[in-house]
Image (spheres, grey):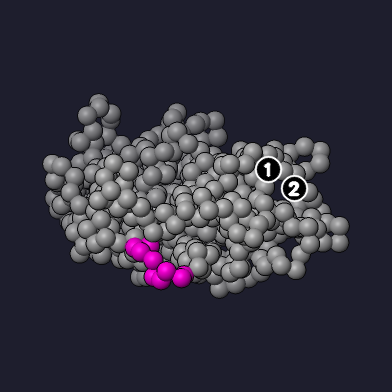
Amino acid sequence: MQLHLITPVVPTAEKQPGDEEIHGKLWRVTGPYDITSTTPGTLPVHFHCVSYVWGPSTEKKGSFFNCERDISDQTRPALAAAIKAASVAIAQNESDAPIVEAFWIDAICIPQLEVPERYKTLESMGWIYSAATSVLIVLQRPIWHIIESVSAATSPRALTYQEMQILEQDTWISRVWTYQELVNAHTVFFTTLEPTSAGHAMRAEKFFNCVGFSLDTWKKATAQGYIAVLETFHNLDTLQDTLADRQLGDYLERTAFGVLSNMALRAFDPAFPQNRLLASLGALSQDVSWGPPSTTLAELAEKLMAICELKGDYSFIYTSDVRDPLPGKGWRPSPSQIAASEPANLVPVANWSTWGTQNGHRDLKGLLLDEMVLLKPADRIDDEVENVLEKILYGFPALQNSGIVINGIFRHKEGDEEDLSRVMLRFLRKIGFKGHGEPQVCKQGLFFSQLGLESYESVEIYAASSLRWTFGSPGLATWKRNGESRYCAGVFVGVSKTEVPQSILLE
């Protein structure tokens, strides 16, 4: 990859073609900087990353820093706002750190011609954002005023319903790049495009802290189940999960499944479908891109899976993708998926916040997927498991105060005769499950497979025990066809912890 930065021109130097005057000072694109023998903590230069929304309008080629392709008309004002914000931000820093006057902004600093260096830089976004001194997020006026109000309060306050609605519609909150920027950033400041002589810079922590608090306050005040949050504040709920991943990033490794699940809930330009996988790659790896650059969705999917395999993370197996037809790889999502209007590469079977990992290891026979529980077919699920699922779906009285009800997924039952599997399927559809609607009934719960399994013989079903949701876990079905093993992912809802987990061989 190539690291280019925008830095101030020495006052005694002459202006060169491509230099731009911003706030009375000349700035120049410099680099590439040598990063081959450095780590993010030992870079020869410090810099800020600028985060902003491109929008639909553009400036023409050559209009800003002699750019070699059309860029967003928001790039120029975003950089100007970030330059002012950086000086304000350093004043808020209690350390004696020097002022950093170098900036990385995508439209200018990513190599602009269609050359390998461009693609390798796009694959290295995790490295770039984790190496930055801070990330300066440039916001539009409506959301900026809300964050400014929340951050000015001496104690946390809940957002109003109207404020939450404004945030819910904001493009920055919902875009795929926001996830990788936030989970990689060491320090985050908000600023705004609104011009002032001094500039703005607001630490992000107070706003971040109030997001989950506000969602929970609204849910309790309206006596709503969790499904109402998904339907009313989908983007804010996704942001809350992102912030949880950011907080836990120093302690817990992010899994491919967790990252892909969050990305599946975010927006990207359909004209650039590769952005979803590029942002996922940046969230999973803080390394500089290695190997040949990836120019297709299939190449990006392959690189993402290869990176995860090197770390022992096989959670990407729980995707709805068609499996690889190559011998010995039937368990693995195929990098080449059938072209479709919606994403088809590495799409999780369901999108919900997880905890834990899905490790695996190889031997001479194939891949051993660790900590898996064999699900036992039955005529009906155990009464105890059914009781647990009822509580998850509809809530239950608090142990210490029966007058307080812990909210479930739904507010209440819509009918006494409604079948548990139908209610659960309705929920799974809400969180992105598009597989077969008739579950496999097991003692431990219900398994909703991506494919219908009724016509297959010798089917075995497994649930992950080390990668979990509140209501169950991802799972895997396997069967034989013409002597070869076949696989598909699915969703297990229930309780599997009563069984002894084992490593299963995938051939």
Residue at the image position 25 percent from the left and 26 percent from the top: 96
Question: x, y percentage for residue 26?
Answer: 28, 48
How far apart are the alpha carbons under marks 1 and 2?
A: 7 Å
User: Please, what secondary structure does the residue beneath circle 2 have?
Assistant: strand
Magenta highlight on residue 42 = no
Question: x, y percentage for residue 55?
Answer: 35, 66
Question: x, y percentage for residue 426?
Answer: 48, 68
Q: Main secondary structure of the magenta part?
A: loop
Horizontal side of 71 relative to 147 (left or right) equals right
Residue at the image position 76 percent from the left and 64 percent from the top: 456
Which residues are drawn in magenta? Answer: 410-418
User: Please, what secondary structure does the residue beneath circle 1 have?
Assistant: strand
**Mark 2 — residue?**
506
Horizontal side of 462 relative to 445 (left or right) equals right
Residue at the image position 82 percent from the left and 61 percent from the top: 481
Dots 1, 2 in contact, CB < 8 A: yes
Q: Nearer the viewer, residue 75 or 443?
A: 443
**Mark 1 — residue?**
369
Horizontal side of 417 relative to 502 (left or right) equals left
Q: Which quarter of the figure is the N terminus placed in?
A: top right
Q: Nearer the viewer, residue 200 or 418?
A: 418
Other-residue count near label 2 (Cα within 10 Å), few / some / many at <14 / 14–19 / ≥20: some
Q: Quadrant of residue 60?
A: bottom left
Amino acid at dot 2? Leu
- Above or below for 73 versus 294: below
Question: x, y percentage for residue 311?
Answer: 61, 38
